[in-house]
Image (spheres, grey):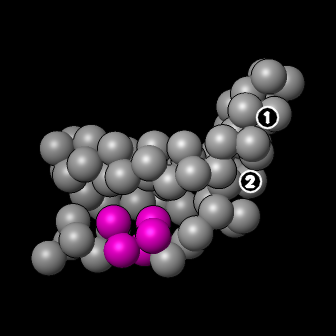
Amino acid sequence: MLDGTKKHISKVAYKEFHRAYQGAVRRCQLISHTAFLQGIIPSAIRIQSHVCKSQEQSASVSQIKT
């Protein structure tokens, strides 16, 4: 999701999205912490995008597009 979104929005908007995304990541700290400890950074992002509140991420994208 993150890669596809990054291609379609400006760098400034991406920074805003990324900040909101990091907030979602923090809410799923157990998952991210475990994955990051294992050194699986891209996998951690993928896991979070599926497991964490996708509604929150969608809301972030919607705010950027309007």
Kind of residue sitting beneath label 2: Ile
Please tell me which residue is depicted at 27% across the width and 42% down the height of the picture.
15
SS of the residue at dot 2? Answer: helix
Residue 22, image x and y in percent?
A: 45, 44
Residue position marked by numbered label 2 in the rendering: 47
Q: Residues within 10 Å of mark 2 (few under 14, many from 20)?
A: some
Please tell me which residue is depicted at 25% across the width and 57% down the height of the picture.
9
Predominant secondary structure in magenta?
helix
> Which one is in front, 53 or 16?
53
Q: Quadrant of the N terminus?
A: bottom right
Kindly tell me whether residue 32 is visible in this rendering: yes
Name the image quarter holding residue 57. Answer: bottom left
Kindly tell me whether residue 14 is visible in this rendering: no
Sequence-wise, the earlier of marks 1 and 2 is 1
Residue 44, image x and y in percent?
A: 72, 42
* Mark identifier at residue 35: 1
Please provide the residue range marked out in magenta.
56-60
Would you say the residues marked 1 and 2 are in contact, meaning their CB atoms lie under 8 Å apart? yes
Q: Would residue 17 be found to the left or right of residue 21 on screen?
A: left
SS of the residue at dot 1? Answer: helix
Please tell me which residue is depicted at 14% across the width and 76% down the height of the picture.
66
Q: Is residue 66 above or below residue 7?
A: below
Kind of residue sitting beneath label 1: Ala
Q: Would residue 59 be found to the left or right of residue 9 on screen?
A: right
Taking the magenta stretch, the answer to whether it contains residue 64 is no
Q: How crowded is mark 1: few (under 14 residues within 10 Å), some or many (20 or more)?
A: some
